[in-house]
Image (cartoon, rainbow, N blue to C red):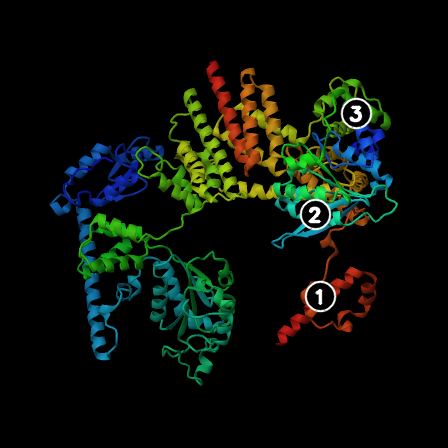
Amino acid sequence: MSLWVDKYRPKTLDELSYHEGLTTRLRSLANSGDFPHLLVYGPSGAGKKTRISCVLRELFGKSVERLKIDQRVFLTPSKRKLDVNIVQSNFHIELTPSDVGNYDRVVIQDLLKEIAQTQQVDLSAKQRFKVVVINEADLLSRDAQAALRRTMEKYMSNLRIILCANSTSRLIAPIKSRCLLVRVAAPSLEEIQAVLQQVAKNVGFDLPPEASEKIAEESNGNLRKAMLVLETLKMQSKDLNSPLLTIPKPDWESYCHKVADLIMSEQTPAKVMEVRGKFYELLSHCIPPTVILKTVADRLVDKMDESLKADVMYWAAFYERRMRIGNKKIFHLEAWVVKVMSLYKVMCTSIY
Amino acid sequence: MRTPPAPASIDCLSGLSFVFTGELPGFSRDESVSLAKRYGGRVVGQPSSKTSFVVLGNNAGPGKLKAIEKHNLRTLDEDGFMNLIATRKGPSAGGKVDDKTRKKMEKEEEEIKQGAEELARREEAASLMFLSSGEAISRLTQLWTVRYAPKTLKEICGNKGQIEKLQQWLVDWPGSSKSDFKKPGKNGTNIYRAMMITGPPGIGKTTSAHLCAQLAGFTPIEMNASDARSKKLIESGANTMNQSLDKWLTGKGSLKTAQSVNAAGVEITSRSCLIMDEVDGMSAGDRGGVGALAALIKKTHVPIICIANDRGAQKLKPLLNCSFNLPFKKPDAVMVRSRIMTILYKEKMKVPANVVDQLVEGAQADIRQVLNMLSTWRLSSDTMGFDDSKALVKMNEKYATITPFAIIQKLLGPYMFSPNARETLNDKMELYFHDHSFVPLFVQENYLKTTPSLVRKTDTPPEKLKLLKLMDRAASSLSDADIVDSLIHGPEQHWSLMPLHAVTSTVIPASCMYGNTSYTGPNTISFPQWLGQNSKQNKLMRQLGDIQVRMRLKVSGDKTEIRQHYVPALFPHIVQPLMDDGTSAVDEVIERMDKYFLSKDEWDTLVELGVGSHKDEGVLKKVSTATKTSFTKKYNLKVHPVPFHKAQDLGKLPKKLSAEPAPDLEEAYDVSGWSNATNTQPNFGTRMMTTFRMRTMTTRRNQ
């Protein structure tokens, strides 16, 4: 009864369906006996984690799939206790240091050294080293990244690190130079459709190509999203052949579209405050500010006059950068909204 | 600033009342108000039928214009106002004043004279006493605040009703003591054994307490912050007066046998009254003092009057429950003026009424401070002009903390940034530094709520555009401010950027958007939402993290992926069935949750995370109560797979208890409870705990 996305996740390198070249390379790496540190990057929903677990399986065999979760407590220098959740098997360990915010350095230092200094005790193990998978590596603070540098070289005999990130731009150069960079690009429309068809076949229903095409388009190259949408769609509408089929949008996306419509409807202080309220609602319900900005901007560009599109996107990029540097995201979101409103108003008044 | 003309006489505006509205071209609001006051005029905020003139500037408030029409008031423009000053003759120059005003002035003068005579008489009597008793201190060397302290209830300025209540309570004390504080009396005060007077400094709280006690025939005994008042001292009575407060408790009875006399030589009888001054000053050194005092109040046989400045203070909580609250307000400026004028007449100082008003206003009705200022001034001069008083007030300015609400009213209000405002950039930045963490948040919350003065009518397209331009400038400046803020609070801590933050976060937005602010409706100045929203976000983020950890064994995505894709995708599986099918869907939902190791708590979070059509309120409304209860019941009945145990779930006995002696097992369990206790471990633990607690409680009581 798991969701399809989890049920039909490929477990071995052989089952992977797209990026054939990458799969071959990963297989030969895993079998070479000279496995490097990896930095796997690409957009979310492209299959980074799936590929990492396939590589682990190739390295250590089936027993790597026996996972357990542990909660470890770390002490900061100021004696604050940090709870960190760790997923591990006998051969590898997976952690998300960015969960503890600024204290990620402590976690990296303590945990990595501990693992690095103990050798693999299981004599039947296929490899002499353990693997540490670090999730959300692009959110690591600079200190934490610096703490990784030397450990990666010094304990190479006991330890390999696989970093998983959305983009490499926030990683410092020394880290990048110590890793083999593996880019997992988003699957193309055809690739997504092929996967969807495969899943439909496995489940045992007929997926019309029009529906799969619609889903693929809607998913923006995020295969996870595509699969979840497919399942929701199958549950909600019995007849997938109907030409009126609409792809269900997630709650936050339709909410963002409402915001965009508000911005277009009227350009007054009262409307800005209404938009602010909606932004607060989205932010407090854990929608990342950059996602909000992108979704609203996309919607605005769809609806607005051609002449304004470039400007709207320019300012969206401008304020997205500021959001990343600054603390209070809502300030920048609001500044962008006001900017867009005044641009729009200028255009409207110049027409008449 | 335009130079005002020479006045026809120094009190040329006396007897007139003014209302100012709008901006005068040549003067700022403060300057014009001060001009009117300088020449003896009265300035009021709202026009009424008694207003003599309304001085109209540009952009006058619509409410005031309506009132002018309604009351048919005379209006002046700036030139007219100047003309009035230059030509009207005040009473001192033989100008005409109408009968009513003259009579009023004469009456006031008469009262002042009488008061001064009374003071003089009293002083004479006192000096006679001084000669006969040979006391060490002469009246003449006393501070004015002591020399002219009120001697009768009539002389206390303001708070008449409250003082009467206090007086009545003291008078009724023997009766209410006899009835064991059961009869509330006409003010409802007689069921209390203590009074709590609260109010700002210098308005006569201590004086009233002493006076009332004396007049009701009690001997006041005062303890203030200079005495140690810790719990131990209050309980054992080893205080500065070497006098156990237990004596207070016994009251009349035991006093017959034990002659108790305090350090000041005052005999403690049932006619004593304890005045606990400055109770909010019972601080670090007086640990437990407030609690002990509250306990004392509950059994005292002498009246206790507590005095404090801030009623809202957290540490006064225990006292508020057991005492009657008497809030004292700042007295009316007129009352204070007549009292001060009397004293000045007695001291043979020539200070006009408007100057005294200025002083009283500047000291925020703190009579003590006004007297101190005047007594110092007296050393150098007998007269005081309007400008002197202004300077004096400025010099003695109390550092008053302005609330963020007042700051934001000033900043976004119409005067701070108007063309003829006299505030410098530094003055404006100073407002930011009153509370540099709150003011920017307030500005951000409220900058869109004004009716900007820079845009007059908002219905024409060019004006609408101008408004948007201003908003844009303000908003982008706020965005700059956040960047500056992250530099200040970032790892490098550039605190030297604070002034820049002041300008970008506060001054620039306010300079664009200043205008009229409203007190009602949707555009009321409000507390920043950011704080609440931010903590809500943190809370939900943490809960989302819990979900992600639990789902981790099945799902590869990170937190944001879970929120963006799994939460909407899980909705039709684990929430929708409960909404549509009700109780029959519960089993299926629970099974689905177990697949992902989600517990009931996580289900709640998943619902709470929804927005728009999935908003938690709307969703929960659609799930019937029967379904909810059956869901909870069924969930609790079954055993669910758990991905891992949290460290804190396992639970430990608190360390502190291990020091206690081991519990007697026979005492711990009754016979029937024994079998239960051995069967289930957690039960065993809780039983041990309760026994421990009971034992510690009994041992304490025995001690």
Which chain is mark 3 on?
A
Give the percent coordinates (x, y) of residue B266.
37, 78
Query: Which kind of residue does numbered mark 1 sit on?
Result: Thr
Rounded to the nearest whole Å, what is the CA distance between mark 2 and mark 3?
A: 36 Å
Mark in front: 3 vs 1: 3
- Which secondary structure lies at badge 2? strand
Mark in front: 2 vs 3: 3
Same chain shared by disc 3 and disc 1: no
- Decide if residue B350 is in sight here: yes
- Which secondary structure lies at badge 3? helix
Give the percent coordinates (x, y) of residue B552.
75, 41
The label number, if any, that marks residue B690 in the structure image? 1
Query: Which kind of residue does numbered mark 3 sit on?
Result: Gly
Q: Vertical placement of A181 versus B17: above or below?
A: above
Q: Vertical placement of A125 versus A248: above or below?
A: below
The label number, if any, that marks residue A224 in the structure image? none
Residue B616: quadrant of the picture: top right
Which chain is mark 2 on?
A
Q: Which residue is mark 3?
A: A21
Query: Residue at image x 49%, y 17%?
Result: A348
Q: Vertical placement of B135 versus A179: above or below?
A: below
Circles 3 and 1: CB distance less than 8 Å?
Answer: no
Q: Which residue is mark 2?
A: A84
Camera-side residue of B351 and B63: B351
Left or right: A111, with B188 as reference point: right
